[in-house]
Amino acid sequence: MAEADPPRASAHLVLTLATVAGAGTMTVELAAVRLLAPWFGTSLVVWTNVIGVILLALSLGYLVGARLSAGALPLARLGGVLCVAAAFTAWLPFGAGAVAELFLPSELALDEAAALILWGSLAASLVLFLPPATLLGAVAPLAVEAVQRVESGHAGRAGGRVLAASTAGSLVGVFGTSHWFVPGIGLSATFLGAACAFGLAGLVAVLLGRGAKTIAAAALLAVGGGLVLSRATGPDLAEGWELLAAEESAYQSVRVAENVAFDPPMRHLQVNEGFDSFQSVWQPEPGLLPEGYYYNYFALPLHWSGGTGRFRVQVLGLGAGTAWRVLEGASPAGLTLDLAGVELDPTVLDLARAHMDLVDGVEDRRVASGVDARVALRAPDEPWDLVVLDCYANQVEIPPHLSTREFFAAVRERLAPGGWLAANLGGFGFDDPVVSAVASTCSAAFDAPVLLVRVPSSRNFVLYARRGGGLPLEGEGLAAPAGEVARRLLAQLEVPGSFRVVSDGGLVLTDDQNPIDKLELRSLREGRARLAGAGG
Amino acid sequence: MSAYLAVLLLAATPAVDEAYDTARALMDEGAYGESWEALQTVDDPLLRHRGEVDLFYRTRDFAASLATARRGLELFPEDLFLLHRAVSAAIWLRDVESSLALSERLGRAVQRTELSEAERAAWAADATDFERRARRLEQAASRRDTALARARWVSLALLAASGLGIVGLALKK
């Protein structure tokens, strides 16, 4: 018969330890993706890998805990397991960068890293999170055994109470991590806080359970070292760039970097992994950016419209306001811009106001902060003359709900007669799976052909759709309004293969059926080969 | 004299084809649409290919520039201008295989083409530079492949070990 723990180790204490362990486990699981995000992003693939590894580890941990629970002092072993888990957890911020860089070399273009995002994030997750999550998985069986021995009751009763306590803790971990810990104290402090919670719980269990204090002491020493040294760092900036600011938001890691070697100097706002991409761009004067930046082509509808007076623009995915600055400096004479924007991440807006000259909250400059673009479309407002869609997540992903026929139909409904949609798309050629599917879908929603324009010196395309009024075509080319801005943007599009008119007939993405994730993976995998074979 | 300048001079050298000269002048003015139209009337196939390759290059459609250069190189396999633009476009596209192959081909063509010493030195320098950049792309691709193999092996090994651990512990009495 198993020896019972000393009477002072009450069931309530064990359940409290299980609650703490549950909270910490969910904290680690949620924050794990953010820890890898600067290298691998936060795409569905990365989430799947991290969650999958945690589940695998828990499964293994349950069996490990079952074996350990057969021993004489389950409470003491519970304490030891928690202490060692604390040690691993404390060093996760420090180890993440080194491990990630083993599986993701620098100087890769985004499409070149596509396969590495899948396998690299899986390998990094296994190396980093398998050990601590396995240990945390062992907590539940040990806690069940400890409770049962104390109460001499049924296994089911003990198991149910431990699971309830652990799950209650998990709820605290889930909501606390997303709403308070990561945005409030940052990633490193979140992991260190979880480590301290594990360590404290483990120490209590070791002391009360009369367990091996040596293991606990060594583990807690490691936690102490982690408190001093273990800090999460992101990938190095590219050569020539200097960091101006970095923040952790509830959604992503955000940083602003500057390169003074450019004339004029340039600032980029980057989120999560950077590769060779950026989320927003700033230069000292509003107006057209250097060649290769797709934002410039958002200005064309202003010139194609050929009107004067008030021109209302809504930018979905405002970021740091790059589209606004381009439009402000590149609009034709006689137009008065009424600019609105929607940006999901308030931290991006804060950094933009501080470092990228975003001015909002004044007449004709309004931002809806913390709002999803599709939700924002439902807000009552006057019709728009131009809706700009620039909502890429993680550099390559269009949020699925912003790429469907229903979404584009909603955009169309918010446009004034003759109003425009201009959407940024990334891809490798007009036949890129993502580019062609989104264009077909948009055409179906607008019930009219749409225009795809290649952005020179980039992997980007701009998709134009119009609510009535026809596309800006003259003969076999694009309409060329007068003015230096239009001339500068359209000159390089005068050669064959610079644009394509797309009608409904291809794959149409709907809210119910939208394989955009698969199309994005296919686009990245096939990208280089498609470009190499382009042009016939 | 740099090879880049040599390329420009080669392209700008007045040819007997008036349409080509007109197309180049329009290209220099940024009238790319009109330049394209003028190039379609050029009789000399080499000049026409050179013009189209350069036009796509200047309008920053590097995929089209490379594809057009390849078609031209089928007819004129050692034309330095076509090779120069083709390598440059391939490097921009980060096409490792094409970059390496075309830069080596440019190097060989430089040796076989009748040139003055100064011209040969300039072209050779560019060919060497292209080859260096192509090698850098190759090294980056190699690092990527190594990292991918490492990620796959580590993942499969740890998954297998975890799976065996689960099965072993589950079966053990």
Image (spheres, coloured by chain):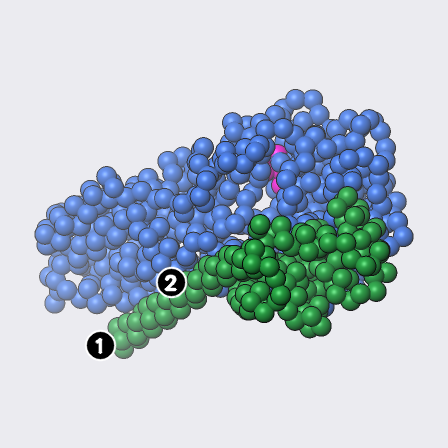
Chain colours: A blue, B green
Per the rendering, the mark at residue B173 is: 1
Chain under label 2?
A
Instruction: Write the residue at 66% across / 22% down.
Output: A362
Instruction: Write the residue at 61% across / 62% down.
Output: B115
| In this picture, residue B72 sits left or right of residue A151 | right
Q: Alpha-carbon neighbours of circle 2 within 10 Å: few (<14), some, or many (≥20)? A: many
As rendered, which of A524 and B136 lies closer to the eye? B136
As rendered, which of A54 and A515 lies closer to the eye? A515
Find residue A95 and report its horizontal and vertical position in percent. 30, 51
Q: Find disc 2 in the rendering and name its residue.
A: A123
Proximity of marks 1 and 2: CB atoms separated by less than 8 Å = no
As rendered, which of A398 and A470 lies closer to the eye? A470
Query: Residue lying farthest top?
Result: A362
Q: Quadrant of the C terminus of chain A?
A: bottom right
Amino acid type indicated by mark 2: Ala
Find residue A49 and report its horizontal and vertical position in percent. 43, 61
Instruction: Write the residue at 72% across / 60% down.
Output: B50
